[in-house]
Amino acid sequence: MSAVRCLCALSCMLLVGLLTGCKSEMRSAYSPAVGSSESSDRETAAESALEPMAGMPARPDEGRGPGVAGDRYERILENEFRAAGANPLSTFSIDVDSASYAKVRQYLMQQGMMPNPDAVRIEELVNYFVYDYEPPTGEHPFAAHVEVAAAPWRPEHRLVRIGIKGKEIEQERPAGNLVFLLDVSGSMDQPNKLPLLKRGMKMLVDQLGENDRAAIVVYAGAAGQVLDSTSGDEKQTILDALERLQAGGSTNGGEGMRLAYRIALDNFIQGGTNRVLLCTDGDFNVGTTNKGDIVRLAEQHAKAGVFLTVLGFGMGNHNDDMLETLSNKANGNYAFIDSDHEARRVLVEQMNATLVTIAKDVKIQVEFNPAQVEAWRLIGYENRLLAAEDFNDDKKDAGEIGAGHTVTALYEVIPAGAESEVAVADVDELKYQRQGELSEAAQTDELLTLKIRYKAPEEDESTLIAFPVEDSEAQFGAAGGDFQFAAAVASFGMLLRDSQFKGDATYDAVEEIATSALGDDPGGYRTEFIEMVRRATELK
């Protein structure tokens, strides 16, 4: 046993030496940026995140004791019904992440077990799929569409679907300044981790052109730059650097992130795509390990114009909590890669949506008309909720939309005067205030008013879109195919979570609705969903 420990220690020392050697032979990644005053300003904006972390002591992640193994998820407390009279406003940040869906698929299809309930973020399940929303035709970078019909799991309730479609890139994709930040620690030495990571990044490299540049930073016990920023038409050079990567050692993700962001700033392309792609199982265990410190690092660099894409790999020690929070705070997106098929979806089929941001800090605020709505509930988005006053505060961070992306949000609504067995969260009657007379607008047939705020990628001031929505009183069977399919996916998520709000939903009903709403299915993703439903039925 002592001999094994010695060999392990020797391997770690050799790896650190190799990485240190890489850093000394390559151009220093910490050299000052050269060029315009904008470059200097960006570096200054990010510097406050770099310096304080250098001497910070390592400490365990919040909520995780030393030596605790297993995947880690943030606890989800489901949104409850809110009385429209006392709580007419619902405000949240949009989310285009898809990691939860792929994670659920891995549980069901590869591991043969029901997923951890906290791994099931219903909004990510719904948003995994592309819906046929009409693209924008006016000045705004996206179009919003609303449809209302009966909720399939509780027909006396209404289901409101808000759909957003981002504009496609019609001209050539903006020049890309990419830094691949790759975890090569010992925990990545599994077939579904580093080997899959390398295959996925090779798919992305094949899509790069002469206007793109890519650098590679790796981290284990130490961090090093193994490939300087290289033109995208020198594909073989980039591919060779990827092929040489091997796993071993502990995980110093904080140092790797600092180095990757420095390189991204050094090679910043004004008006281009400046992005770090973090590929990891999320197990940061040496150096700066505190989630808050790492999130602040990413958040500050997002303000400097360098965004983040997070790609998670593997099971067993996957820190989903850390990675999902990182993507939320860093103007980023988060996907989980469980197969070559998923890598191709994210890095080839949806490359523009993954890399090119068309709108940032996108917030939605819905005002419900208490004359038409007794109570409402936002389905999912539990960790994206905002205070009502945050909607008009341009300093508050929110989600991003990529080129061509679709975003979907669902509300379950109890109509005014409807008989419902659902408990509604309420407050005591106020002593010093009384609800005033309903406004003139409340006397109309408007169910709600939808408001959306967003910023252009390089702007700091938001733009507002707003329009009223009426209820067509359609039954579920009369709703569009995309509406029905999204409702089936939401039902599935509630069943997996054993939600108190699942109503009459069953796996058989989910399968029946999804099958009837299959429609055009490029890539076979909707068909695959039906197979997941059948698998969950068997396991349950």
Image: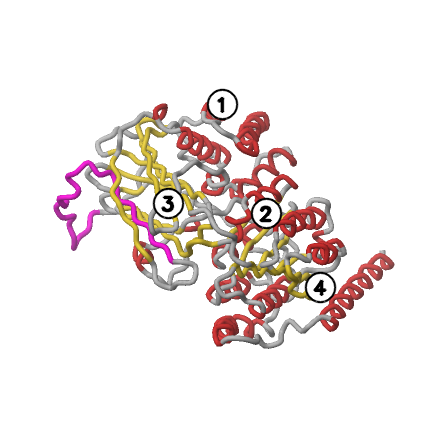
Pick the residue in front: 29 or 159.
29
Residue 226's disc number: 4
Name the amino acid type tagged 2.
Answer: Leu
Name the amino acid type tagged 4.
Answer: Val
Q: Earlier in the sequence, mark 1 or mark 4?
A: 4
Which of discs 1 and 2 lies nearer the camera? The answer is 2
**Helix, strand or loop for disc 3:** loop
20 w.r.t. 73: above or below: below
Q: Earlier in the sequence, mark 3 or mark 1?
A: 3
Q: How far is disc 4 from disc 2 in space, using C-alphas?
A: 22 Å
- Left or right: residue 204 versus residue 519 is right
522 w.r.t. 174: above or below: above
Query: How dense is the environment of label 2, judged by Cα within 10 Å: few (below 14), some, or many (20 and up)?
Result: many
Which of discs 2 and 3 lies nearer the camera? The answer is 3
Region in magenta: 429-455
Name the amino acid type tagged 3.
Answer: Pro
Q: Which residue position is annotated with label 3?
A: 136
| Quadrant the N terminus occupies | bottom right
Q: Earlier in the sequence, mark 2 or mark 3?
A: 3
Residue 347's disc number: 2
Q: How far is disc 1 from disc 4 in space, using C-alphas?
A: 51 Å
| Quadrant the C terminus occupies | top right
x%, y% of residue 421?
31, 30
Circles 1, 4 touching at the beta carbon (< 8 Å): no
Which of discs 4 and 3 lies nearer the camera? The answer is 3
Name the amino acid type tagged 1.
Answer: Asp
x%, y% of residue 520?
49, 29
**Helix, strand or loop for disc 4:** strand
